[in-house]
């Protein structure tokens, strides 16, 4: 049975964590150069693969004792907060090398494959993959966590493709990363408290 509050919570956390990520910038660059639907098809498939891997890893954590799981989750949330804080501070210039590799006359499969490849490689061990694994371990509901994470990642991908430049004119990337880092610290503290309390 799907748990709507879990789906919405995971969606919100993953969405905020993914906004300042380099993959959102890559989606923005690819979307500016190629048809957004073609790019999104590849990006969406790559995000789906990563969520399945993350949820499977998080589900394995649930086999450990509750205190151990909460301790691991607390540490990983804290590490995630540091990573996301640094991500906003060290935001690099957009790298257009990927989009330069494919000509304007490329077809759907070539552009979708490019979108898939860029995201597939960039997301391994990424903050949102770690976050998704943590949430799968915390909620013991892999399907709801998976749906929330996929929808959150897809929403950021679409936002990057359709309106990323406009958003960044109004909300500095530094503020987006700061909010995400604070949320992760709160989650780390709560999980740490649960681990101590048992």
Image: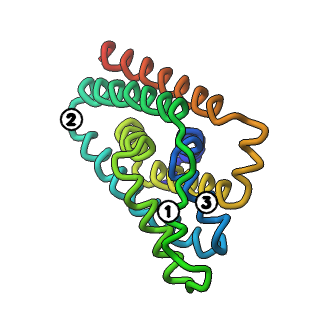
Left or right placement of residue 72 versus residue 38 in this view? left
- Disc 2 or 1, which lies upstream in sequence? 2
**Image quadrant of residue 126?**
top left
Dot 3: within a 10 Å radius of its alpha carbon, few (fewer than 14), some, or many (20 or more) residues?
many
Q: Which mark is residue 64?
A: 2
Q: CA distance from mark 3 to mark 1?
A: 10 Å
Q: Nearer the viewer, mark 2 or mark 3?
A: 3
Report helix, strand or loop for mark 3: helix
Which residue carries the number 3 mark? Answer: 29
- Disc 3 or 1, which lies upstream in sequence? 3
Q: CA distance from mark 2 to mark 3?
A: 42 Å
Dot 2: within a 10 Å radius of its alpha carbon, few (fewer than 14), some, or many (20 or more) residues?
few
- Disc 2 or 3, which lies upstream in sequence? 3
Circles 2, 3 touching at the beta carbon (< 8 Å): no
Q: Position of residue 173 (x, y in %)?
A: 64, 36
Q: Which mark is residue 97?
A: 1
Looking at the picture, does residue 125 appear above or below residue 53?
above
Between 116 and 106, the residue placed more toward the observer is: 106
């Amino acid at each position: 049975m799907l748990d709507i509050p879990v789906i919405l919570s995971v969606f919100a956390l993953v969405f905020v964590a993914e906004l300042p990520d380099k993959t959102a910038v890559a989606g923005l660059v690819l979307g500016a150069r190629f048809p957004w639907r073609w790019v999104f098809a590849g990006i969406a498939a790559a995000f789906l693969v990563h969520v399945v891997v993350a949820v499977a890893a998080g589900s394995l954590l649930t086999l450990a004792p509750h205190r151990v799981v909460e301790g691991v989750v607390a540490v990983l949330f804290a590490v995630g907060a540091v990573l996301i804080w640094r991500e906003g501070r060290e935001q690099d210039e957009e790298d257009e090398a990927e989009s330069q590799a494919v000509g304007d006359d490329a077809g759907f499969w070539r552009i979708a494959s490019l979108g898939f490849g860029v995201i597939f490689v960039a997301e391994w061990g990424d903050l949102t993959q770690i976050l998704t694994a943590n949430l799968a371990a915390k909620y013991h509901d892999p399907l709801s966590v998976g749906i929330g994470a996929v929808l959150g990642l897809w929403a950021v991908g679409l936002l990057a493709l359709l309106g990323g430049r406009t958003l960044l004119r109004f909300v500095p990337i530094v503020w987006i990363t700061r909010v995400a880092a604070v949320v992760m610290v709160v989650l780390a503290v709560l999980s740490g408290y649960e681990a101590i309390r048992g």
